[in-house]
Image: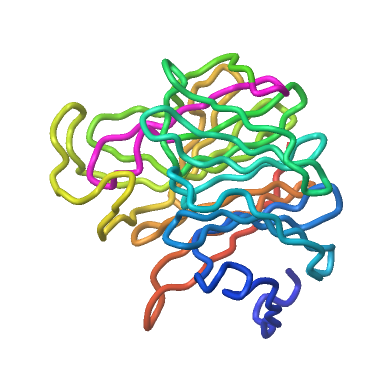
């Protein structure tokens, strides 16, 4: 953080030799239990893998989550658990199927979340809280359709507790929400926003979008919302005005780190923003 323009040293931790020749695609990273964990998709979103690295990114093991899955493995989320990590894959028109691994990479079991008031789409994120798990999830990833996003609360066994919209505005598409829960009970969420999309209940203005096939453009602005413990929105800030996608958020001490990808001269690049939280 003290030298943000220093050259980056890249280290290869997995290749197509690990996936039967397929390139790695969508991925998710967390640091938990003293290890780096990276879940990634391959084989046209039919396979899913879980990579375990030590603190210095030396590879310890690669675990297969699924192969030739009928569920899409792209746009997954991953979250730390008290006894391991969990990878979530989309269950279309319901929610997610969760694969729960212990710290040694053994599968502890699977569980399905969603349905009813808890129904949600992919492009979600999750965080471990003192009492269970908090999932932030959109209604749809279709970039042409209205989509609010929800805050879904579960206990430590992933039993559903409460479900509520954080934001739900007709003609706006909120997706890919990612946030942190502060010790004060305030929730800070970064989400991608597209405006001028189809109104709720109307056909999308472009065909070919949807969960399985998204056509460009699917980018938008990155907007940060802060919600009070009672669920009301107390602050709103645009941190990337246009052309951005895939915000991710983590809290380390009093530093909130947000990353996303967006336009840059000659193409696209990744951005990293660091904010200090004061109480």
Q: Quadrant of the N terminus?
A: bottom right
Q: Which residue is at 50% across, 71% downward?
A: 23
Q: Quadrant of residue 103?
A: top right
Q: Is residue 131 left or right of residue 238?
A: right
Q: Main secondary structure of the magenta part?
A: loop
Q: Quadrant of residue 62?
A: bottom right
Q: Nearer the viewer, residue 14 or 257?
A: 14
Q: Looking at the image, is 245 positioned above or below residue 210?
A: below
State yes or no: residue 152 in magenta. yes
Q: Is residue 134 left or right of residue 53?
A: left
Display coloring = rainbow
State yes or no: residue 202 in magenta. no
Q: Looking at the image, is 47 positioned above or below residue 235?
A: below
Residue 235 on image: x %, y %:
50, 35
Q: Nearer the viewer, residue 86 or 199?
A: 86
Q: Quadrant of residue 243?
A: bottom left
Q: Which residue is at 77% across, 44% downward?
A: 106
Q: Is residue 62 left or right of residue 168?
A: right
Q: Which residues are magenta?
A: 138-158
Disc tally is 0
Q: Which residue is at 52% across, 47% downward?
A: 76
Residue 278 on image: x %, y %:
72, 42
Q: Nearer the viewer, residue 123 or 246?
A: 123
Residue 233 on image: x %, y %:
48, 27
Q: Is residue 112 left or right of residue 263?
A: right
Residue 219 on image: x %, y %:
33, 56
Q: Which residue is at 68% across, 20% downward?
A: 155
Q: Quadrant of the C terminus?
A: top right
């Amino acid at each position: 953080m003290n030298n943000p323009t220093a050259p980056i040293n890249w280290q290869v931790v997995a290749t197509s030799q690990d996936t039967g020749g397929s390139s790695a695609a969508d991925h998710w990273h967390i640091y938990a239990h003293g290890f780096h964990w990276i879940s990634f998709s391959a084989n046209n979103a039919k396979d899913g893998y879980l990579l375990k690295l030590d603190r210095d990114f030396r590879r310890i093991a690669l675990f297969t989550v699924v192969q030739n899955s009928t569920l899409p493995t792209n746009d997954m989320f991953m979250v730390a658990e008290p006894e391991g990590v969990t990878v979530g894959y989309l269950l279309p028109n319901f929610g997610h199927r969760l694969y729960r691994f212990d710290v040694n990479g053994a599968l502890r079991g699977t569980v399905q979340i969603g349905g009813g008031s808890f129904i949600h789409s992919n492009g979600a994120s999750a965080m471990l809280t003192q009492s269970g798990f908090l999932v932030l999830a959109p209604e749809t990833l279709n970039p042409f359709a209205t989509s609010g996003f929800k805050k879904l609360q579960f206990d430590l066994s992933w039993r559903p507790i409460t479900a509520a919209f954080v934001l739900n505005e007709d003609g706006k598409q909120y997706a890919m929400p990612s946030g942190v829960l502060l010790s004060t009970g305030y929730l800070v969420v970064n989400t991608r926003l597209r405006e001028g999309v189809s109104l709720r209940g109307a056909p999308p203005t472009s065909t070919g979008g949807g969960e399985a096939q998204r056509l460009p453009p699917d980018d938008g602005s990155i907007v940060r919302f802060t919600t009070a413990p009672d669920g009301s929105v107390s602050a709103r800030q645009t941190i990337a005005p246009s052309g951005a996608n895939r915000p991710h958020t983590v809290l380390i001490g009093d530093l909130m780190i947000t990353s996303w990808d967006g336009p840059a001269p000659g193409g696209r690049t990744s951005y990293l923003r660091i904010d200090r939280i004061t109480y």
